[in-house]
Image (cartoon, helix red, strand yellow):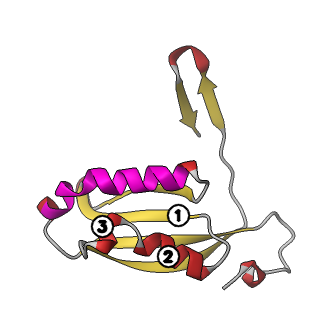
Amino acid sequence: MSQSVIDETHDGLQKLYFVCLTRPTRPLAELEKHLSSHKAYLSGLERDGKLLAAGPLLGEGARYDGNGLIVFRAKTREEAQELADNDPFHVRGLRSYELLPWQVNEGSFQVRLLFSVGKFDLA
């Protein structure tokens, strides 16, 4: 699936991403043992420009239940699948995933960078 799947009839700026919904297949304690390698992998994707966003999904009462969401910047479904397959959680069979193409048509965000304290805010 390439960027040609984008709806050409929409007048706005469109962007295609791939959403990876991940779910634990093993107890959370097993995931925790490999959390640092998972985070290192995602940090590498971020540096390479392949990661838009990632983080845990929160269940009832805003508690972490092991589910997660990763949004890849990839040109094809095959590239996104390779990125997902290489996540240490997926390699070890600790999580399964569902990969969905996502066409972004609307929305906005702002970045506020505070140089003096080395922080930023997304709004």
Predominant SS along the magenta part: helix
Which mark is in front, 1 or 3? 3
Which badge, 1 or 3, comes first in the chain's sequence? 1
Residues under labels 1 and 2: Cα distance? 13 Å
Lateral position of residue 112 relative to residue 99, left or right? right
Element type at mark 2: helix
Residues under labels 1 and 3: Cα distance? 16 Å
For the residues bearing labels 3 and 2, Cβ distance under 8 angstroms = no
Image mark for residue 100: none
Which mark is in front, 1 or 2? 2
* Residue located beneath label 1 in the image: 71
Lateral position of residue 119 relative to residue 35, left or right? right
Residue 112, picture quadrant: top right
Q: Residue at x 31, y 73 (%)?
A: 91
86 up-or-down from 46: above or below: below
Going by the numbered disc 3, the residue's amino acid type is Phe
Going by the numbered disc 2, the residue's amino acid type is Glu
Element type at mark 3: helix
Instruction: Please state the extent of the stretch shown in magenta in the rendering.
Output: 30-46
Does the magenta portion include 32? yes
Image mark for residue 89: 3
Q: Residue at x 55, y 74 (%)?
A: 80
Quadrant of image for the N terminus? bottom right
Which badge, 1 or 2, comes first in the chain's sequence? 1
Location of residue 45 in the rendering, given as x and y in whole percent from the top left corner: 51, 56
1 up-or-down from 54: above or below: below
Residues under labels 3 and 2: Cα distance? 13 Å
Location of residue 57 in the rendering, given as x and y in whole percent from the top left corner: 35, 60
Q: Residue at x 44, y 72 (%)?
A: 84
61 up-or-down from 77: above or below: above
* Residue located beneath label 2 in the image: 82
